Amino acid sequence: MKSKILKLTCTAFILFFGFQTLQAQQSDVASNETSNYYQTELPNSNSKSLEIKETVLEEGKYVYSSKGNEVIVEIKDGYYTEYHANNEYIKAKIEWSAENKYTLEIIDINKDNLPFEVGTKMDTEIVKIKGTRIYYESNLEGLTWSGKFRKI
């Protein structure tokens, strides 16, 4: 008898919990909570596109190593700027396509011996975050590589 009551109680609990979870998910969708992340139409735009409002990289400063040198990266006001040794830099417009994916379009360069120029686009996906380290995979005109930033 106790076994039947226990089974019945467990079944009722599972059904109740499942119903509550389903109801909460439907409520989230109905209340447009996803609108905190995406805006389906940009202001002053006739075309529909997405504006990503929450991203895994915050505005601020990061650092990565390149050929034994530290490169400072600053993300601010929709721009991504790399500061290299000898006052060299690369500045790009950053456009997010998802909370962990962005495209950089080079708008200004003061660095020698680069295989790209103003107007070149590079796609990057953040694949993992561990502490202050941000791991990414980039694609530039068919060339791919992995790297990591560190938040500073």
Image (cartoon, rainbow, N blue to C red):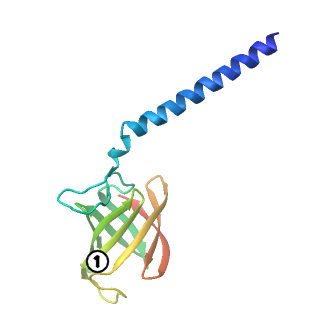
Residue 3: which quarter of the image? top right
Q: Residue at x 36, y 36 (%)?
A: 31
Q: Residues within 10 Å of mark 1 (few under 14, many from 20)?
A: many
Seen from the viewer's position, the closer of residues 101 and 61 is 101
Seen from the viewer's position, the closer of residues 106 and 29 is 29
x and y percent of residue 11 in the render? 69, 23
Seen from the viewer's position, the closer of residues 121 and 129 is 121
Residue type marked 1:
Ile
In the picture, measured across the screen, residue 125 lies left or right of residue 33, that is right
Q: Quadrant of the C terminus?
A: bottom left
Q: Is residue 150 above or below residue 66?
A: above
Q: Is residue 9 above or below residue 59?
A: above
Q: How many marks?
A: 1
In the picture, measured across the screen, residue 16 lies left or right of residue 140, that is right
Q: Secondary structure at mark 1?
A: strand
In the picture, measured across the screen, residue 109 lies left or right of residue 13, that is left
Q: Residue at x 45, y 60 (%)?
A: 134
x and y percent of residue 74 in the render? 28, 64
x and y percent of residue 111 in the render? 28, 84
Name the outermost residue toward the top.
Answer: 1
x and y percent of residue 151 in the render? 38, 58
Q: Is residue 116 above or below residue 123?
A: below
Q: Quadrant of the N terminus?
A: top right
Name the outermost residue toward the front.
Answer: 46
Q: Residue at x 47, y 81 (%)?
A: 143
Residue 98: which quarter of the image? bottom left
Q: Which residue is mark 1?
A: 106
